Amino acid sequence: PCLLWLGHLDANKDPLTVLEGLSRAGPELRDPQLWCAFRSAPLRDAVERRIAGDPQLEGRGHLLGLQPRDRVQALLRAADFLVQGSHREGSGYAVIEALATGTPPIITDIPPFRSLTGDGAVGFLFRAGDPEGAARGLKAAAAGDREALARNARRHFREHLSFEVLGARLVEAYQSLISG
């Protein structure tokens, strides 16, 4: 599978847990490739050492750095899955963008991600800081029907997260405030 990381390389986003999960899942995956687009990277040296020091990861982890918006969209469309190891998030823009492009996420089971995925109805959730859970998510995702997973991600976005749906929900909320 082609995996895309969108997020900082920092302790909150926790790339080391994702890398450990990928290492554990690697023997059961066929030539996985992880592409990492990021802005800040306080853990870059640790990530580079982790990739270089593990035969399951060496040559499979690609650090792209900061990417322009149009390139991020192209990366999302090319990826099989989005991966993130966040311990906390305010919203989850990368997950929203992934679902909009039909890229199923393999992400941590935190409140905003549960909300965005319909409690895991689309994508694969694992506990933050749990490399074994990340490995299980990676293996389950790779074993799934990628076309069906992509269709489900796009459908979920259209039905729950699109501008039209969110706009209608806001109008309903405002109308209930006015009439209440």
Image (spheres, rainbow, N blue to C red):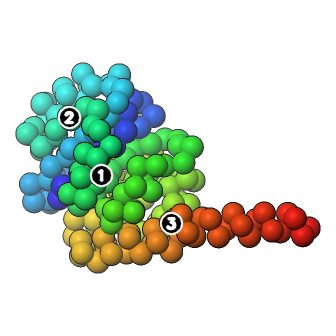
Question: Disc 2 or disc 3, which is closer to the eye?
Answer: 3
Residue designated by label 2: 63
Q: Residue at coordinates 27% horizontally, 25% vertically from top-left?
A: 44
Mark 2 or mark 1: name the one nearer the start of the chain: 2
Which numbered disc flags the more N-terminal residue, 1 or 3? Answer: 1
Q: Nearer the viewer, residue 28 or 94?
A: 94
- In front of the other: 175 or 62: 175
| 7 relative to 21, above or below | above
Q: Position of residue 79 (x, y in %)?
A: 22, 56
* Residue 146, quarter of picture: bottom left
Write down the quadrant of residue 126 in the picture: bottom left
Residue 82 locus on image (x, y percent): 31, 54
Query: Which amino acid does the dot numbered 1 rest on?
Result: Gln
Disc 3 residue type (three-letter): Ser
Please tell me whether mark 2 sits on a helix, a strand or a loop. Answer: strand
- Quadrant assignment for the C terminus: bottom right
Q: CA distance from mark 2 to mark 3?
A: 30 Å
Can residue 127 be seen in the rendering of this structure?
A: no
Decide: is 152 above or below 65: below
List the residue tagged with mark 3: 162
Q: CA distance from mark 2 to mark 1?
A: 17 Å
| Residue type (three-letter) at the residue carrying disc 2 | Leu
